[in-house]
Image: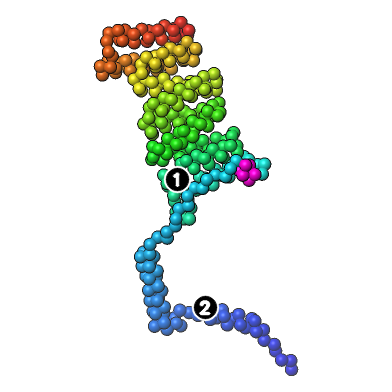
């Protein structure tokens, strides 16, 4: 009679399954209670220890100096556009390191602007570094750091006014509203107007920022003279735009009279004459 062979693997598997699926009622109550008590104690101990332990301390890594232009071009290996974008992504992610957030306030803005400048040298057609400078890094709550960003944009504008005019306009607004430095804002606005005067793609509001800043500084004579020049050159032709300039000059004149900033009748007469001259010139050229 042939001896029946037993499949040990199958038998062992059935034993394991049988042991794994034993009913809970088969576990002694004391063992069951002790098991849950041990789990509860371990959870309590873990929560308590985590609450008592101080958060992990990591030293923030300072922003390193950018490599030389030669090294960056060698790193780019012929693909300068992709390299510049990769470096910008790395730079913008630098505030998150080792599981903690490093405030932009803690960054060295002199080193930061050198990085932005180096990245622009890789791809001077890109707007990414200047967008970040004007709309991200210039928002930090520090007037000196904002001033550093403004000067960086100013330098890049001087290199390529046709491309970077909008960032110069943004820097002018930052100088006025965020640094509260109207003389600096006026300098930037004047540089913007002079450099882009003959560029048709630059809108009138950007070229005329100087006019409004002169009015903010109560420089009636200079503001009126500039408006008159713009009218004569045919740069102010829209009726609504012209009305805005006239209304602002009228408001400035009334404010100066109210604040007793008009010295005598002769000065007041000259202010009237300048405004009449502006209106006459506009009518002669546009109506």
Placement of the N terminus among the 4 image quadrants? bottom right
In the rendered view, would you say 231 is above or below 29?
above
How crowded pointer 1 is (Cα within 10 Å; few <14, some 14-19, many 20+) is rated as some
> What is the x, y in percent for residue 207?
47, 21
Q: Residue at x 42, y 46 (%)?
A: 106
**Which residue occupies 27% across, 10% down?**
264
Q: Is residue 34 above or below residue 87?
A: below
Q: Residue furthest bottom?
A: 1
For this rendering, which residue is in front, 243 or 211? 211
Dominant secondary structure, magenta: helix
Q: Residue at x 38, y 37 (%)?
A: 143
Q: Is residue 29 left or right of residue 203?
A: left
Name the residue tied to disc 1: 107
Residue bearing mark 2: 21
Question: In the image, what residue occupies the spot 44% across and 82% down?
Answer: 27
Magenta stretch: give its range: 70-75
Does residue 221 appear anywhere in the picture? yes
Compared with 126, 260 (above or below) is: above
Which is more N-terminal, label 2 or label 1? 2
* Image x and y of residue 248, in percent: 36, 18
Front in this rendered view, residue 266 or 38: 266
Q: Secondary structure at mark 1?
A: loop
Extreme right residue here? 1
């Amino acid at each position: 009679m042939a001896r029946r062979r037993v499949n040990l693997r199958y038998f062992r598997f059935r034993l394991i399954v049988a042991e794994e699926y034993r009913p809970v009622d088969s576990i002694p109550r004391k063992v069951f209670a002790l098991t849950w008590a041990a789990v509860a104690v371990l959870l309590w101990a873990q929560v308590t220890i985590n609450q008592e332990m101080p958060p992990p301390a990591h030293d923030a890594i300072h922003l390193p100096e950018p490599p030389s232009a030669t090294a960056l071009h060698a790193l780019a290996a012929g693909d300068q556009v992709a390299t510049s974008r990769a470096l910008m992504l790395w730079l913008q992610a630098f505030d998150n390191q080792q599981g903690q957030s490093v405030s932009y306030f803690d960054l060295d803005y002199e080193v930061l602007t050198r990085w932005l400048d180096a990245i622009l040298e890789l791809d001077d057609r890109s707007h990414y570094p200047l967008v970040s400078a004007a709309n991200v890094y210039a928002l930090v709550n520090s007037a000196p750091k904002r001033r550093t960003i403004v000067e960086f944009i100013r330098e890049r504008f001087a290199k390529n006014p046709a491309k970077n005019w909008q960032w110069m306009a943004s820097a002018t607004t930052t100088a006025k509203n965020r640094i509260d430095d109207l003389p600096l804002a006026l300098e930037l606005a004047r540089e913007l107007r002079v450099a882009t005067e003959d560029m048709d793609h630059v809108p009138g509001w950007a070229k005329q920022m100087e006019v409004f800043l002169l009015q903010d500084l109560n420089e009636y004579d200079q503001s009126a003279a500039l408006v008159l020049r713009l009218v004569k050159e045919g740069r102010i032709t829209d009726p609504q735009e012209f009305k805005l300039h006239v209304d602002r000059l009228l408001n400035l004149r009334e404010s100066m009279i109210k604040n007793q900033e008009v010295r005598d009748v002769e000065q007041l007469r000259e202010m009237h004459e300048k405004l009449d001259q502006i209106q006459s010139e506009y009518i002669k050229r546009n109506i």
